[in-house]
Image (cartoon, rainbow, N blue to C red):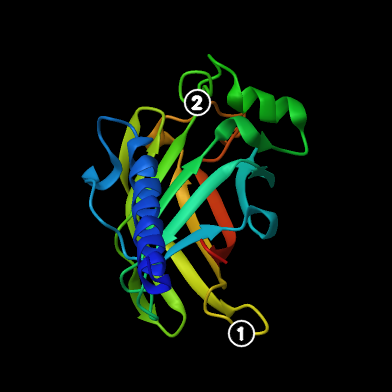
Amino acid sequence: MSQCTEMNKDHHREAELKELRQLEFLDSLPSTKNPLNLKKRRRPNSTFLVDTTHSSIQFSVSHWGIYNIIGWIESYEIIAFYDRPDFSDMVIEAKIRPSSIQMPNKEMANNLKNKGSGFFDVEDHPIVYFSSDTLIHIEENKYKIPGRLRIKEVEMDIIFDLIFNGFTHPPTKSMPGFTVYGVIKRDQFKIGGTDVLPGNGLPIIGNDVHVTINARLIHEYD
């Protein structure tokens, strides 16, 4: 068998494995109310993974109406598929594990995870899902990411802001960097209660959760 034939077979096998990994990721999404009603269809050919050693997911929310508490997620998977240099065909899939929430106040972090606390109940709802099949260019390096977010049993549309920060140095298009901003309304996703402080009526925990994602992508085969 010629070397050329062997190379073609290896390339074909690699493509099959790549598609299988994409479909396995979709299979891991909930069987009902799939974000964007995802179908098992071929994504753009190039697959990019978020490098979790150089990325972060952070959040902040008002506490007692006078300061912000912060936290971060330690376990997550984000995959982006795109071929076009302007990212216009980008598809994003994300799985986030709220059991990995960390905060300076460990007792507060544990309360967010506990069953019966009204927050994430990670025992029964271990994964938060996000998916988007559209990236909208606004101007220069600014984009909008409309998608579907599922937290516990609630799934709805949401829009995040994305800033393309450029490519790594020395420049290589296989390693772009992005910053994503967004606000999640707690009441819409039934996360926590609505208790207020006696006297001034300020909410103990604010309704707006500000999310910031700093992501460095790496090409699947780099």
Q: Secondary structure at mark 2?
A: loop
- Mark seen at residue 171: 1
**Going by the image, does 183 lie left or right of 15?**
right
Q: Secondary structure at mark 1?
A: loop
Residue type for callout 1: Pro
- Mark seen at residue 193: 2
Viewer-side residue, 70 vs 30 = 30
Q: Quadrant of residue 161?
A: bottom left
| Residue 10 shows in the view | yes
Residue type for callout 2: Gly
Q: Residues within 10 Å of mark 2 (few under 14, many from 20)?
A: some
Measured along the vertical axis of the image, is residue 189 above or below residue 78?
above
Say whether marks 2 and 1 touch (CB < 8 Å).
no
Quarter containing the C terminus: bottom right
Say which residue appears at 55% left-offset and 35% top-offset. 97
Sequence-first tag of 2 and 1: 1
**Going by the image, does 196 lie left or right of 186?**
right
Viewer-side residue, 124 vs 216 = 216
What is the distance, in whole Å, between disc 2 and disc 1 at their CAs?
Answer: 47 Å
**Going by the image, does 154 lie left or right of 39?**
right
Quarter containing the N terminus: bottom left
- Residue 150 placement (x, y as % from top left): 37, 38
Q: Quadrant of residue 53?
A: bottom right
Measured along the vertical axis of the image, is residue 36 above or below residue 175?
above
Say which residue appears at 54% left-offset and 68% top-offset. 178
- Residue 50 placement (x, y as % from top left): 55, 57
| Residue 198 shows in the view | no
Viewer-side residue, 14 vs 178 = 14
**Going by the image, does 57 lie left or right of 136?**
right
